[in-house]
Amino acid sequence: MFRKAFLLILATVLVSGCATQTRYVDPAADDGPVSMSLDYRDFERAATEAVEDMLASGAVDNPDGGRYILVVSRITNDTMQRIDTDQLIKKIRVSLLRSGKVVTTTAVGLNGAEDEMSMRARELRDSEEFDQSGVQRKGTLQAPDLSLSGKLIQRNHKVGREQQVEYYIQLTVTELGTGLAFWEGETPIIKRGSDKSVSW
Amino acid sequence: MITRVILLALLSLVLSGCATQPPRSELYDREELSVDPEVQFGLVVTELFQERLRQPSGNSLLQVAFAVEGRADTRFGWKVTWFNASGMEVPGVGKGYREARVLPGQHRYFKATAPHPSVDSFQLHLREMR
């Protein structure tokens, strides 16, 4: 009886010791292993390089003072992964907003407004149910000055017994008045690892 | 006469003691360059520059550039933390370290641009990547 109990406790201790503990990852101090697919560190690196280069170039600094209005255009995901491109674009938007140089409009978009409430709120105009002093007036929405578009590309190669995955994050800022690309950037992210690991 | 002078001086001292002191912010000198000892075996920071980039609107952004020379094949991480004139941190785009590799005898040059015109100072940290 005593021996059985002892074995049971020993088995419990061993099993619990083998289990991988779930833990929080601090993005400011993450030395964790690298995967072949794109992870948050890659998006952070691409966003940092893009924003710093945009700011340093002066392309997003309005010479008349005030902030430029940016609209997010098409960001094409041409990788084998299912990626929400907002993971990258949101970081860029947040940083540009914090820089005090650019503000993003959510009232216009290629597939409709990002936030439809800007237009819906205007449908309250002339409604007798609403205090009209708080309803948005005509001609108050701001048209964008700049457009952000881009593409995420993936290329896979076999290098000896290893696999090389190349990602290219390409971004363009177009000045909508002239249609000229005021800023362009490309961040290559190259990973080499086991041929058995998958990158999708 | 002497008693009067002493009393006047005493009164002045008492009154000045009661006066509201202006708020003070303790400013500690931060080192602009911080290199972990583990990295110092593999590389040496040979240059560290800073300049303010003029912007079309008239304001300016702080830009930092540094160079390293490799003594051995070394993987390292670098990160610049930005501060405003009061010494408060100004958040950048990312929180993580940017990974880089330097080969023996290789010179590499890096630069970073401040996220906001209010950035006044910085700290560059180099650490070993495991």
Image (cartoon, grey):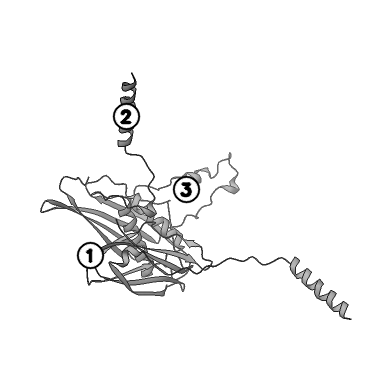
Q: Residues within 10 Å of mark 1 (few under 14, many from 20)?
A: some
Q: Nearer the viewer, mark 3 or mark 2?
A: 2
Occupied quadrant, residue A170: bottom left
Q: CA distance from mark 1 to mark 3?
A: 55 Å
Measured from the top left, where is residue B87 in percent x and y? 51, 65
From this viewpoint, is residue A26 visible? yes
Tell me if B64 is positioned left or right of B41 in this view. Answer: right
Q: Name the disc covering residue A10, or none.
A: 2
Residue at coordinates 33% horizontally, 33% vertically from top-left? A16
Q: Which mark is nearer the camera, 1 or 3?
A: 1
- Residue where numbered disc 1 is placed: B73
The residue identified by callout 3 is A118
Q: Amino acid at mark 1?
A: Asp
**Residue furthest out toward the left:** A160
**Picture layout, residue B63 above or below residue A78:** below
Front in this rendered view, residue B108 or A59: B108
Classify the position of the C terminus of chain A by image quarter: top left
Mark 3 and mark 2 lie on one chain; the one further toward the N terminus is: 2
Q: B38 left or right of B26?
A: left
| Front one among A107 and B5 | B5
Which quadrant of the rendered structure holds the N terminus of chain A? top left
Q: Amino acid at mark 2?
A: Leu
Horizontal and vertical percent position of residue B116: 45, 65
